[in-house]
Image: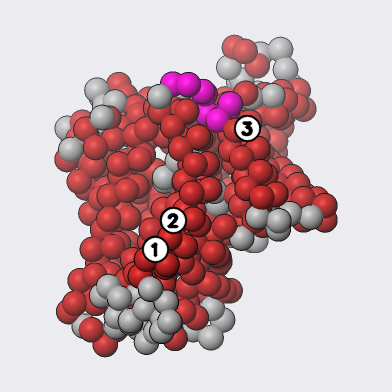
Amino acid sequence: MDILFVFLLFASFMVVMFSGFPIAFVLGGVAVLFAALGTFLDAFNVDADMASLRMIGFVANRIFDTLSSYSLIPISMFVFMGMMLDKSGVAERLLTRMHQVLRVVPGGMAVSVVLIGVVLAASTGIIGASVVLLATIAMPAMRGAGYDDRLGLGVVGATGCLGILIPPSIMLIVMGDQLQIPVGDLFRGAMVPGLLLALAYVAYAVFIALRFPDRAPAKPIEAGREVREVVLDLIGSLVAPLLLVIAVLGSIVFGIATPTEASGVGAAGATLIALMSKRLTWSGFREVCESTGTTTAFLFALIFGASCFSVVLRGYGGDELIENALHAIPLPPTGTLILILFIVFLLGFFLDWMEIILIVAPLVLPVLTALGHDPAWVAILMAICLQTSFLTPPVGMALFYLKNAVPDVEITQIYRAVLPFVAMQIGILVLTLLVPKIALW
C-alpha cells in the first residue's frame, strides 16, 4: 500500500505540474490531499516530531519553520542586492567600458561579456536579470561589430547562468538549508568550478574568433580615444562592484561574517553604490523593495510547498523506498553517484532547479553520504549539473529570457547556440567528479 501511495504521489505531482498550475501550490496541494487521503485510510504515519499534529497542523508548522529559518534570510538580501545593482546602472557602464578595451582582441567583445557576467554573478546571482541585461546591452553591440548571432546568443545565455553557481548563489543557499550543509562551505566549493566555467567560455570565444575570424572580428579602438583613457574609464567602472564583491565574498571566505551577515553588507553596499551613481530615486527604491518582496515570497512558497511534500513522502516511507532501491543497484559507490547525477541532468530538461533541490536532493544525499562521498562535494556536483537545466529545452528558463530579450531570433536558433556551452558545463562536471579537490580545496 505504501509503495502504491508513493507512486501515486509522484504521478499526481507530475500530472498536475504539466497542467500549468503554479508549482508552489502543486507541491503543497498534492501533499495536503495525500495527507488527508492517507489519514482517512489509516495509511499515513507522520514521523515522531509531527505525531501530535494533523493535516492542517503540519502545514502551518512547515510554513512557520520556513519563514523563521535564519539560514534563508540571505535569499531576500541577495535578491535585493541584485535588484539594486541593476537599478544603479553599474553593469551597463561596465559592459560598455569593457567592450571599448577588448574590442581589439579576437573575440574580445564575447570575452568582455563573460568577464562582466562573472562580476554580475558575484554581485547578484539572479539569472533572469543577468541574461536579460546582458542580452539587451551586448547583443546590439556584437551585431554592430559583425559578430555571428550563434556565438553571441550562446555566450550571453551561458554567461547569464553563471550566477546560479558563482557565490552568492540563491541555489546554494537553498541547497545548504535543505541538505543541512553550511552555506559557507558551498560558497567556497563553488568558486573554482564557476571560474573554470567562465574560463572555458572565454577559451571557446577566442578559439572561434581565431578559427573563424568572420564570426567574431576584432575592431580598432574608437577614433579620437587613447588606450590609456579607455583603460582608466574601465578601472573607474570596476572599483565599486569589485569592492562590493570583496566585501561580501571575502568576509564569508575568511570567516569574518556568516553568509546571512554578509548578505546584509551586500544589500547596504548595493544601495550605497546606487546612491553614489545618482540613479536611485524614491520610486526606484520602492520598486526594488516590491520586486524583492514578490521574488522572495515566490521562492519561500516553493520551499514550504516542497517541505510539505517531503513530510508526506516520508510519512508513506518514500525515503526508505528510494534508499533501498539505490542500495539494491549493483554498482560501486562512484557508479551510483554518476547514475544519480545523470538522473538529475535528465530531470533538468523538465523541472526547474528548485523542485529538484527540494524534492530529489534530500532523498539521495543520505544514500550517497552513506556510500562514503563527501556531502559538500556531492552538493557542488549537483549544483554544476543543475546549471545545465537553465540551458536545456524544453524548460530551460535562460532560453526563454533570451528569446524575450532578443525577439527577432527563433527559439531553435537559441537551442543550437547554447549546445556547445552545455557540453562545456558537462565537461567541468566530469572534471570536478574526477578531481574532488576542485570543490574541496
**Residue 15 picture quarter:** bottom right
Q: Position of residue 67 (x, y in %)?
A: 70, 29
Label 1 crowd (10 A; few <14 / some 14-19 / many >=20): some
Amino acid carrying mark 2 in the image: Ile
If you read the primary sequence from the N terminus, does the residue marked by circle 3 or circle 1 appear first? 1
**Residue 78 picture quarter:** top right
Q: Which mark is residue 223?
A: none
Q: Which quadrant would the C terminus be assigned to in this image?
A: top left
Q: Residue at x 35, y 29 (%)?
A: 376
Q: Position of residue 250 (x, y in %)?
A: 44, 32
Name the residue that disc number 1 marks. 231
Name the residue that disc number 2 marks. 235
Q: Position of residue 81 (x, y in %)?
A: 62, 45
| Residue sitting nearer the eye, 71 or 289 | 289
Name the residue that disc number 3 marks. 264
Q: Can the viewer see residue 140?
A: yes
CB of mark 1 within 8 Å of CB of mark 2? Answer: yes
Q: Is residue 231 above or below residue 138?
A: above
